[in-house]
Image: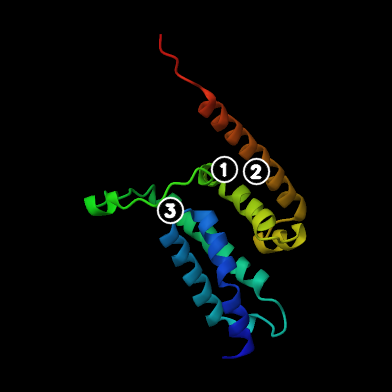
Amino acid sequence: MDQRRAAILAEIPRLRRYARALLRNRDSADDLVQDCLERALGKLEGWRTGDNPRRWLFTIMHHLFVDQMRREKRRGETAMLPIETSEAMAVPAYQAESVASHEILDALQAISPDRRAALLMVAVEGFSYAEAANVLGVPAGTLMSRIARGREELRTILEDGSRRRAIRVIEK
């Protein structure tokens, strides 16, 4: 296997993490990663040997994600099919510390895709502001604005959620 392909394969865990955070659906995220890898491997000449493929791959994935969001918006919302009884009974172990993780992931899904992508690029994937702006195809100022607004939106959603959990029903 040549050096470029090995470097691309090494980025798969990061691509999967980013895709799952964006889409919050394992199957859709895996499809997005596969589409990204297919496009990248088909256009290897677009990437220079010796460069880290991370920024290039994330740019491809972001463009595919935006295209997917536009297609879904044109088609309308998708409906979930009911699951079979045997599948409904299979429930993963519920851990108290995972509640906060689920709340954060739910809150991320509640903010706009542009703000979510900006936050994930910088806060989760560790891109610098300049790199994330380049990957997302926006000016650095726009990226910083999206991050600031996204953080504020998350704070509001999470504070509202914690207030709801704190409400107790008192019976007389």
Mark 1 and mark 2 in contact? Answer it, CB < 8 Å.
yes
Residue 154 x, y percent position in the rendering: 62, 39
Q: What residue type is labelled 3?
A: Glu
Which quarter of the image is occupied by the N terminus? Answer: bottom right
The picture places residue 15, in percent across and down from the top left corner, at 57, 66
> Label 2 is placed on what type of residue?
Gly
Among numbered discs 1 and 2, the one appearing first in the sequence: 1
When asked about the image quadrant of residue 9, the answer is bottom right
Is residue 127 or residue 101 the one in the foreground? 101
Q: Distance between the residues labelled 3 and 1?
A: 17 Å
Give the residue at x 54% y 55%: 21
Amino acid type, label 1: Ile
- How far across and how far down the image is residue 150, in percent? 65, 43
How crowded pointer 2 is (Cα within 10 Å; few <14, some 14-19, many 20+) is rated as many
- What residue sits right under mark 2 in the picture? 150
First in residue order: circle 2 vs circle 3: 3
- Residue at 56 percent across and 77 percent down: it is 40
Q: 5 left or right of 34? A: right
| Local secondary structure at mark 3 | helix
Badge number at residue 72: 3
